[in-house]
Image (spheres, grey):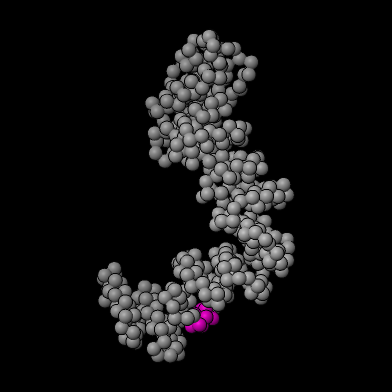
């Protein structure tokens, strides 16, 4: 019997003696990890052992496992009445769930979802790692059964994380059951935890080859070849794409080609790009522009212009504040980037890209930039837009309203001038300066 000075985790959670939980059982079948108040009032943990040969309960017709599950439930409910700090409560709950989930997995999962303390479910999920790894099929059945309601989404993430470590092939076999938004995360979990494993690599490739030719498969194939770079040359992969007979084969072959080009030079990229039809060219440039590469985005945007994919200029991953062009501007030669901007055509889609192309030069060469702007022919949209950017830089970066006015006075286009004057008014309202 447990000593009077110590209590099992169940009785520690409930604050009552162990025998009350066990309904008159003379000897508990399991000595669970103990948590008791020590002499200083803190939480003290005692190691425990599970006794497989323990005595049966005195309740006729009731299994020992069922009794233990009921005891865990009582202990869980009792935690709410304990005087614990949030950190102590979560730690106690996690330790209880770790053991409860090995006895009654579904009951433990339901209890975690009932947690009445906001924002703590994510802290409890790791408690299920051991049970998910030990019983992955049972865990997945419960998650997919619908009995957990919206909460099943939380457990899918934890199941992927836990099971992909020990049983990646099982995870891949369930891919068709994963929600669309979780498939890319699932593939990444499996591949990153087993780098270079030929069995996992082959199973993932077979999984891809069995999927339909749609945008989901395209994204998965792009991720796959990012994590497992093709060993064939771009020319060989281009030939494979050309020989493909189905849409699915073409889709996967194109993503393999793109994966092989991520570390290639622009001459190689252009050579393979030229062999492709317009839609495939767009896929190639779009993927390379929005993936980590060493290539200047300006070179790839030249291909975008040549192919007429103007909508790509509006993609925030390219033209946004943290897009590919903005990141490139931090390391590129400012004048070279500005001169590239002067080659952009006059289209609504190119305005943000032009602004990012010239802003670095204006900022770093504030006075000299005036002469550079005036080297652009009068009436050219680029001159007008460069003056607008100069005014913005003068206000927000240099705190120089006189410089802003210099630029405004030289803008000829009434629409652009009106917009820049409104920007100036906004600056005045925010700063209190004129």
- What range of the chain is rendered magenta? 334-343
Q: Residue furthest front?
A: 245
Q: Is residue 174 above or below residue 366?
A: above
Q: Position of residue 85 (x, y in %)?
A: 41, 34
255 relative to 371 in the view: left or right: right
Q: Position of residue 114 (x, y in %)?
A: 42, 32
Secondary structure mostly taken by the magenta-highlighted segment of the chain: helix
Q: Nearer the viewer, residue 160 or 122?
A: 160
* Quadrant the C terminus occupies: bottom left
> Which residue is found at the position 36% from the left and 73% from the top?
396
> Which residue is found at the position 49% from the left and 65% from the top?
317
For the question of whether residue 319 can be seen, the reply is: no
Q: Position of residue 113 (x, y in %)?
A: 44, 34
Q: Position of residue 121 (x, y in %)?
A: 45, 38
Task: Count the marks.
Answer: 0
Magenta highlight on residue 335:
yes
């Amino acid at each position: 019997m447990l000593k009077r000075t110590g209590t099992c985790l169940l009785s520690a959670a409930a604050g009552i003696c162990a025998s009350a939980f066990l309904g008159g059982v003379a000897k508990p079948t399991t000595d669970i990890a103990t948590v008791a108040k020590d002499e200083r009032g803190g939480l003290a943990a005692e190691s425990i052992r599970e006794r497989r040969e323990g005595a049966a309960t005195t309740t006729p017709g009731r299994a020992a496992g069922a009794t233990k599950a009921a005891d865990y439930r009582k202990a869980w409910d009792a935690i709410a009445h304990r005087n614990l700090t949030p950190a102590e409560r979560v730690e106690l709950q996690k330790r209880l769930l770790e053991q409860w989930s090995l006895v009654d997995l579904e009951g433990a999962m339901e209890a975690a979802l009932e947690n009445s303390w906001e924002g703590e479910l994510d802290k409890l999920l790791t408690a299920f790692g051991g049970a998910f790894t030990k019983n992955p099929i049972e865990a997945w059945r419960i998650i997919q059964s619908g009995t957990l309601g919206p909460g099943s989404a939380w457990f899918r993430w934890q199941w992927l994380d836990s099971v992909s470590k020990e049983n990646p092939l099982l995870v891949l076999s369930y891919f068709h059951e994963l929600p669309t938004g979780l498939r890319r995360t699932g593939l990444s979990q499996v591949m990153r935890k087993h780098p270079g494993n030929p069995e996992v690599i082959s199973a993932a490739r077979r999984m891809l080859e069995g999927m339909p030719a749609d945008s989901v498969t395209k994204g998965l194939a792009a991720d796959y070849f990012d994590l497992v770079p093709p060993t064939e040359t771009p020319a060989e992969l281009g030939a494979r794409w050309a020989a493909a007979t189905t849409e699915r084969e073409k889709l996967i072959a194109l993503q393999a080609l793109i994966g092989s080009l991520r570390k290639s030079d622009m001459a190689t990229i252009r050579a393979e790009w030229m062999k492709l039809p317009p839609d495939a060219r767009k896929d190639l440039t779009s993927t390379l522009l929005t993936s980590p590469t060493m290539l200047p985005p300006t070179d790839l945007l030249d291909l975008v212009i040549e192919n007429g994919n103007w909508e790509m200029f509006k993609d925030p991953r390219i033209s946004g504040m943290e897009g590919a062009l903005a990141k490139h501007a931090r390391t590129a030669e400012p004048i070279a980037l500005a001169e590239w901007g002067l080659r952009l055509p006059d289209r609504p889609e190119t305005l943000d890209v032009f602004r990012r192309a010239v802003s670095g030069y204006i900022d770093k060469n504030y006075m000299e930039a005036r002469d550079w702007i005036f080297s652009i022919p009068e009436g050219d949209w680029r001159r007008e837009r460069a003056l607008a950017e100069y005014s913005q830089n003068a206000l927000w970066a240099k705190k120089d309203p006189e410089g802003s006015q210099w630029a405004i006075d030289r803008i000829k286009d009434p629409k652009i001038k009106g917009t820049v004057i409104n920007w100036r008014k906004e600056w005045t309202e925010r700063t209190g300066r004129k």
